[in-house]
Image (spheres, helix red, strand yellow):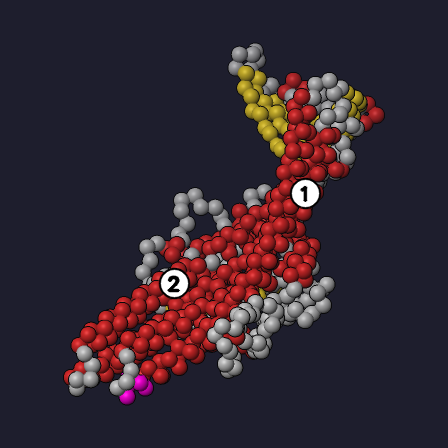
Amino acid sequence: MTLLAPGCKPGDYRREADDKASAIIRQKQLEALGHDEPFSIEKPEQTLRRRLMEAQGLPQSHAASLGVTNLDPIPHWPNDDYLNQGVAETDGIMTIEPNTPVRLTLIDALRAAAANSRDYQSQKETVYRTALALDLERDAFRTTFSGVSSADVSYDSGSDPQVAGIDSSTELGLTQRFTNGLTLSGAIALDVAKLLTQDRSASNALSADFSVELPLLRGSGRHIVAEPLVQSERDALYAIYNFERFKRTFAVSIASEYLSVLQQLDRIQNEEDNYRGLVLTVRKVKADEQAGLQPPIEVDRALQDELRARQRWISAQQSYERALDRFKLTLGLPVDADIELERDELQRLAQVVRDTLPPRKDPLSQTQTDELIPADAPVTLVAPGREGAGPMELEESTATDLALKNRLDLRIAQGDVYDAQRQVVIAADALGAELTLLGRARAGEGRSLSSTGEPDAFDPRFDQGFYDTLLTLDLPLERTRERNSYRNRLIDLQRTVRDFQETEDRVKLDVRNILRDLLEFRESLHIQAGAVELAQERVRSTDMLLQAGRGSIRNALDAKDDLVQSQNSLTAALVNYLIAELEIQRDMGVLQVNEQGLWQTYDPKEVPDDDHHNNG
């Protein structure tokens, strides 16, 4: 609704802009995605960040630390309630218990990121600004009303007799531009002239003025006139594509960072277990030395390994703290907030991987069978293949087809080619002749102080009006600027096509690389799982031999070191595989993310030609 009342509050204009932008965003969501979802750039002030700051008493340097609603209006602040709209009771994410760390699950982290991340909010604001830009372009083809009133008070002291008077004019006008280039404008003006001296006479008159402008050659036609509007419509669509692509990439990055922090936490546990084991080993070796069963050099060797284990344990703790603080910053939360991640999340996801990965049937090599093979027998290596592949390890052709169909950045690149073609059409149109039809009609009378003695005239009398028609022709005799512009647009088209080709090839490359990663990480999972079993067996064997007095301290220490490295490598392989499963869905364009930042994973069992997705 257009605001007509004079003196409307800035807050009213802000709300009108919100209504316009929201309607455009919903329209473009339906065009781009086939559905709409809640979208707002003014998130509740009661975010998780604010509640953590308040509940945990975290230090702050400014009122802005808690959000916009804590700011005081500065001098000359507009008449807008923007700063005191109130604070929402909850952000809907979780409750905060006093003196208790906030524990974030993976789902909690995704939702917190969507509500608090600065990057996420900036991306939403970009969509909003694009919608406002489209509204401005649409406004160029709306009926525009204007109202102007002026009053001139004059006094001539040099005349005889002296003259003083008021000459005022009020004009109401409208302008309508059509997409074929036709522009209509009209105005009705009321003039009032009144003497303040002499006989104090007055006179009023009404006049009307209408004009029309229509390009007939160069610059005519909807494809030329409405081009800025068409481009803005497409830019708004691209903004939705970009934001949707960002949501998917962002969700994967949050999950990746979350799992990486858990990996650091798992490393702490592994290093702690190793450290404790080495402390016990040192105690045993010292006892054996005093009993004369071990030489002093073995004690020193064990002590050195214990010190190295302590160093790794401390390093793992500090690496975890650094990774957790970086993750808080990514989420948009205070880095000094007391936050913990859900330790069991990694075990839960590990179980999901174990449930989805088929067990390996074939040995990795001939040395992993129970059959005794002669040492000089030919060596046959088993190359990795699709045996034991996970559900996301699709055939390369299937994954590529899905990516070419669903990748939103590829759709934007395809649209850029069409946009560049339109620019060639517009540049070619500018090379032609320009023929413009102008028309004007004017009726009625005006008034000034010199005509105060005339009778009022409220009838414009169109039968006595003034009418004028003008046809102008600009021959294409000088078009150097337009010629060069046309050639540049053709060059731009070539460049845009090359950019599209590169985007298409990169989409294919992304898919091929992630499929390779999935295969490598799957093999690594099997290898590292076997390595952990072997390392655990070595630790048991060397400990038993050591207790029996027949083992080597060096072998026992090496076995423990190999175990902790294998455990860390197994966790890394698990995290890598989990992240790669999300990345392949992202790079195929089939990972769906809602407005809360939660994803819906792709089900490869669905019909490949349809974009069906299931809750993950």
Q: Amino acid at mark 1?
A: Val
Query: Quarter-wise, where is residue 592 in the image?
Result: bottom right
State whether residue 44 appears in this view: no
In terms of depth relative to the viewer, which is nearer, 77 or 446? 77
The magenta-colored residue range is 544-548
Q: In the rendered view, would you say 437 is above or below 142?
A: above
Mark earlier in primary sequence (1, 2): 2
Mark 2 burial class by Cα count in 10 Å: few <14, some 14-19, many 20+: some
Residue 399 is situated, as x and y percent measured from the top left of the image, at: 65, 61
Q: Any mark on residue 18, and which?
A: none
Q: Main secondary structure of the magenta part?
A: helix
Q: Position of residue 179 (x, y in %)?
A: 74, 38
Circle 1 crowding by C-alpha within 10 Å: few under 14, some 14–19, many from 20: many
Q: Residue at x 36, y 66 (%)?
A: 320
Secondary structure at badge 2 equals helix
Seen as rendered, the residue at the extreme bottom is 548
From this viewpoint, which residue is outermost toward the front?
A: 376
Pick the residue in front: 74 or 111: 111
Residue indicated by mark 2:
323
Q: What is the C-alpha distance between the residues marked 1 and 2?
A: 42 Å
- In the picture of the structure, the residue carrying the numbered disc 1 is 417
Residue 547 is inside the magenta segment: yes
Q: Amino acid at mark 2?
A: Ala
Quadrant where the C terminus sits is bottom right
The residue that appears at 49% across and 72% down in the rendered structure is: 376
Q: Is residue 145 above or below residue 1?
A: above
x and y percent of residue 465 in the render?
79, 24
Between 158 and 180, the one nearer to me in the picture: 180
